[in-house]
């Protein structure tokens, strides 16, 4: 992706430099090398940030590789008091050297790495970064999402991702700087919570100025003293008390109003750091059996999005591709996406914020239960929540999907404890958003009951979910997917019910011999449209549901049940998809 697309869109500085592009690369399956000073045979050139399994990397090797090395020499453009080296994500365990000095290690394949490399810099402009990555292909006890553990992709699993797969960049910082910035909309008081944490050299006389704008109108210009390098304040916005005027400041998919922000850090009255950001005024909540947006019931029309591309796999081919995905979801009549088994690139969340698309964030699963696997998952999940907390588009957290990684929820207390622990930890880290403890079935601690049901017959779906006594008929007697919907001791307490996976109609005119699969199949465009429209009519009209999530946004490798082909071209006209999604005449 171009260096002009800032990788961290809610904390933007002017002095930064992209390190994406051509790097030296080597596989080290025999673990011959331990240090960057070893005689590493650099056998490849790789295009970062694309994983070596992808064609976009220039390598396209989908074999099993346990260790690989990267090296890049670059000319640093300017130098601040401190220099930070950032990796958007490296899968899975990484060691990083700068000029042969070890500057840090990180475990976890989906969350960012930030390293202060100031003391490792060489005197001149030219610097050398070396990265060692360990990624055991068959390790089922690490969070891996949809990455296949078999050599070739099968069923609903796809090619692996090894090594660097999000943007690498370096930024120059002052001696004391804004380390983290966190926004919390407080709907009931019409306030914006602002938390600023300073990093670097400790000062006793630090202050932060926060400015907010709605368009050209300045809404707030406040200054706060930092106590112990931290400020945590509420910014009161003027509430006119009239719905139409107040609604001009509210964020929603229909009106994605963002508030521009500037945060200025001063030490002893002198400006030492300035960042640009944004936030929004919006509220998500649960009221009995309804999902609420900005104090009103809101019907969720979501599409499941795996976030893969054929040539570049988990890494978007460009920033424009991320924007296009958001635009396509909206053009197909959806007001949100469930990002499935992926912590998506922050640039996607930026476009969802800006263009107006709700996002459910889901933790990539491990598939073997152990204390170690749950510790790994908890660490990454905590980092993901911290990274994405301030995005207004993000409305629901999902730590587990379909009991993956906790397969014995009905019989093993430790598995139930894991789900409940992640649910309550998530609620502790973010009390402003609903949490689905385990999406699909076997629910325990949860704010929304998600059901997965791939029955292809619209009439059977209608009968199943048009019941007069859902507690007895649905939760006690019927088992979509062959699983109980709620665990013993956790009866349905009136939470909203969302059909979070259904459909999955495969239609692939490009491969008429059906070397692909889905949950059902259509053989013509007309049959595909008719089947989709019939399913969506039933689901839209089911009074039990507060919303739905259709499977899926686009074809993903062998799984051809997307509304779009893998290259994002629509299988039927977008207008037909949109009308069916919204259950309105074309």
Image: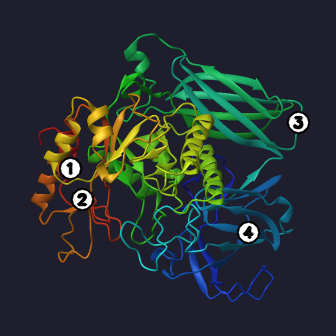
Dot 1: element: helix
Query: Which numbered mark, 2 or 4, is in the foreground of this view?
Result: 4
Q: CA distance from mark 2 to mark 1?
A: 9 Å
* In this rendering, position of residue 477 left or right of residue 398: left
What colour scheme governs how the chains and residues are painted in the rendered image of this protein? rainbow
Q: Are marks 3 and 1 in contact (CB under 8 Å)?
A: no
Q: Are marks 2 and 1 in contact (CB under 8 Å)?
A: yes
Q: Earlier in the sequence, mark 3 or mark 4?
A: 4
Q: Earlier in the sequence, mark 4 or mark 1?
A: 4
The residue that mark 2 highlights is 570
Query: Which numbered mark, 3 or 4, is in the foreground of this view?
Result: 4
Dot 2: element: loop
Q: Residues within 10 Å of mark 1 (few under 14, many from 20)?
A: many
- Residue 214: x percent and y percent? 51, 27
Q: Is residue 198 above or below residue 369?
A: above
Image-quadrant location for residue 135: bottom right
Q: CA distance from mark 2 to mark 3?
A: 56 Å
Q: Residues within 10 Å of mark 2 (few under 14, many from 20)?
A: some
Q: Earlier in the sequence, mark 3 or mark 1?
A: 3
Dot 3: element: loop
- Disc ID at residue 546: none
Image-quadrant location for residue 499: top left
- Disc ID at residue 577: 1
Q: Earlier in the sequence, mark 2 or mark 3?
A: 3
Q: CA distance from mark 2 to mark 4?
A: 42 Å
- In the picture, the quarter occupied by the C terminus is top left
The residue that mark 3 highlights is 203
Q: Residue at x 58, y 58 (%)?
A: 110
Q: Earlier in the sequence, mark 2 or mark 1?
A: 2
Q: Residue at x 55, y 27 (%)?
A: 185
- Residue 116: x percent and y percent? 78, 56
């Amino acid at each position: 992706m171009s260096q002009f697309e800032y990788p961290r869109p809610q904390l933007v500085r002017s002095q930064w430099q992209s390190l994406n592009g051509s790097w030296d690369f080597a596989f080290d399956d025999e673990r011959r090398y331990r240090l960057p000073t070893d005689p590493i045979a650099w056998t490849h050139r790789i295009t970062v940030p694309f994983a070596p399994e992808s064609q976009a990397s220039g390598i396209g090797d989908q074999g099993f590789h346990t260790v690989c090395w990267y090296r890049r020499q670059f000319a640093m453009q300017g130098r601040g008091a401190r220099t930070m080296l950032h990796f958007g994500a490296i899968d899975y365990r990484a060691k990083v050297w700068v000029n042969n000095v070890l500057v840090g290690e990180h475990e976890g394949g989906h969350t960012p790495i930030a390293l202060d490399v100031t003391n490792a810099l060489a005197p001149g402009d030219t610097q050398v970064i070396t990265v060692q990555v360990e990624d055991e292909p068959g390790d089922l006890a690490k969070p891996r999402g949809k990455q296949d553990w078999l050599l070739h992709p099968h069923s609903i699993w796809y090619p692996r991702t090894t090594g660097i797969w999000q943007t690498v960049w370096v930024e120059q910082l002052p001696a004391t700087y804004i380390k983290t910035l966190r926004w919390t909309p407080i709907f009931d008081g019409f306030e914006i919570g602002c938390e600023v944490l300073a990093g670097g050299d400790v000062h006793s006389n630090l202050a932060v100025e926060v400015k907010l704008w709605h368009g050209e109108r300045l809404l707030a210009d406040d200054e706060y003293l930092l106590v112990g390098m931290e400020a945590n304040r509420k910014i009161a916005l003027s509430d006119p008390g009239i719905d139409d005027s107040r609604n001009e400041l509210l964020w929603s998919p229909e009106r994605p109003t963002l508030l521009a922000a500037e945060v200025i850090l001063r030490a002893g009255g002198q400006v030492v750091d300035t960042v640009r950001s944004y936030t929004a005024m919006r509220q998500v909540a649960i009221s009995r059996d309804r999902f609420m947006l900005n104090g009103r019931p809101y019907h969720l029309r979501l599409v499941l999005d795996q976030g893969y591309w054929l040539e570049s796999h988990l890494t978007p081919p460009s920033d424009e591709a991320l924007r296009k995905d958001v635009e396509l979801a909206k053009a197909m009549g959806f007001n949100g996406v469930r990002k499935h088994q992926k912590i998506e690139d922050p640039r996607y969340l930026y476009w969802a914020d800006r263009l107006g698309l709700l996002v459910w964030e889901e933790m990539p699963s491990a598939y073997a239960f152990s204390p170690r696997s749950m510790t790994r998952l908890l660490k990454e999940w905590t980092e993901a929540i911290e990274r994405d907390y301030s995005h207004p588009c993000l409305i629901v957290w999902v730590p587990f999907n379909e009991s993956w990684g906790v397969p014995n929820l009905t019989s093993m207390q430790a598995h139930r404890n894991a789900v409940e622990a992640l649910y309550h930890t998530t609620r502790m880290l973010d009390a402003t958003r609903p949490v689905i403890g385990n999406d699909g079935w076997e629910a325990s601690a949860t704010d929304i009951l998600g059901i997965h049901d791939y029955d292809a017959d619209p009439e059977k779906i209608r009968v199943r979910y048009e019941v007069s006594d859902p507690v007895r008929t649905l939760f006690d007697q019927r088992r979509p997917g062959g699983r109980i919907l709620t665990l013993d001791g956790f009866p349905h307490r009136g939470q909203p019910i969302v059909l979070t996976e259904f459909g999955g109609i495969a239609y692939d005119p490009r491969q008429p011999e059906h070397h692909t699969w889905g949950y059902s199949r259509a053989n013509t465009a007309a049959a595909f449209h008719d089947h989709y429209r019939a399913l969506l009519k039933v689901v839209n009209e089911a009074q039990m549901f507060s919303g739905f999530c259709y499977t899926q946004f686009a074809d993903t490798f062998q799984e051809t049940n997307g509304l779009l082909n893998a290259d994002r071209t629509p299988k039927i006209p977008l207008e037909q998809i949109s009308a069916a999604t919204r259950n309105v005449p074309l």
